[in-house]
Amino acid sequence: MKLADRLKLYDLSKNTYGITTELLVTVEELSELTKEIIKYLRYGVKKNLAEEIADVEIMVEALKHIMFMGDKVEEIKEAKLGRLKKRIEES
């Protein structure tokens, strides 16, 4: 699905369910990803890991859009990635 279509879908979801529900679903998806990461670390099972990563990525993209934070998030990510790169180069 193209980005423009996803953004329209996120707006529709926000208008249908409300921001509170969008936030609750995000927390739920993060929790499910956490559970799948623990399963992988403990048992080597990654059966549902890709699905939960996809769910979290969708919700994060939706939140950046509906909360009008996309540019700010990208700015912060760039700074954090720059610091990570510097730490790795110095180690």
Image: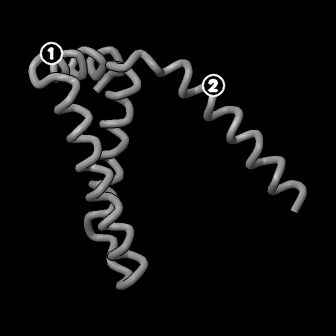
**What is the CA distance from the residue labelled 1 to the residue labelled 2?**
27 Å
Residue at which label 1 appears: 15
Numbered disc total: 2
Q: Dividing the picture into quarters, in which one does residue 76 lie?
A: top right
Above or below residue 11? Residue 61 is below
Residue 35, numbered circle: none
Farthest residue toward the front?
Answer: 20
Residue 60, percent across and down?
Answer: 37, 35
Colour style of the rendered protein structure: one colour
Above or below residue 66? Residue 33 is below
Instruction: Specify the quadrant that holds the C terminus.
Output: bottom right
Task: Give the amino acid at mark 1.
Answer: Asn
Residue at which label 2 appears: 75
Question: Could you say whether the residue bearing mark 2 is in a helix, strand or loop?
Answer: helix
Residue density around tag 1, few if under 14, some if 14–19, many if 20 or more, within 10 Å: few
Residue located 27% across and 70% down the image: 47
Instruction: Specify the quadrant that holds the N terminus.
Output: top left
